[in-house]
Image: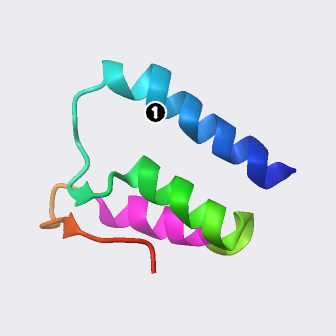
Amino acid sequence: MLTRLVLVLIRFYQRWISPGLPAACRYTPTCSEYSYQAIAKYGIIKGGMLAVWRIIRCNPFTRGGYDPVP
């Protein structure tokens, strides 16, 4: 149930908030899409940890590139 709530919140962010912000993600898929996929695949704990680690790595000092959910 918590997993579903988090997935709904991510989709809300992607649809209503993200379009109003400048594009900043250096990765493909974007950090929000990566988070959605990781949580959908692994659940709130492991998927959440993968998402947090990805968001930490997405900064101006990284090259970025293609980085799919394992």
Colour convention: rainbow
Any part of residue 1 in sight: yes
Residue 53 on image: x %, y %? 46, 70
Any part of residue 48 in sight: no
Residue 23 on image: x %, y %? 22, 35
What is the span of residues highlighted in magenta in the rendered image?
A: 47-58
Q: Which residue is mark 1?
A: 14
Residue 28 on image: x %, y %? 26, 58
Residue found 23% across the figure and 42% down from its top = 24
Residue 33 against residue 20 in the figure, above or below: below
Residue found 41% across the figure and 66% down from its top = 54
Q: Is residue 57 magenta?
A: yes
Question: What amino acid type is highlighted by mark number 1?
Answer: Gln
Residue found 64% across the figure and 61% down from its top = 40
Q: Is residue 67 left or right of residue 69?
A: left
Residue 21 against residue 2 in the figure, above or below: above
* The quarter of the displayed image where residue 64 is located: bottom left
Say how many tags the image has: 1
Residue 6 against residue 16 in the figure, above or below: below
Crowd class of label 1 (few under 14; some 14 to 19; many from 20; radius 10 Å): some
| SS assignment at label 1 | helix
Residue found 20% across the figure and 55% down from its top = 26
Judged from this view, the residue extending furthest toward the right is 1
Q: Main secondary structure of the magenta part?
A: helix
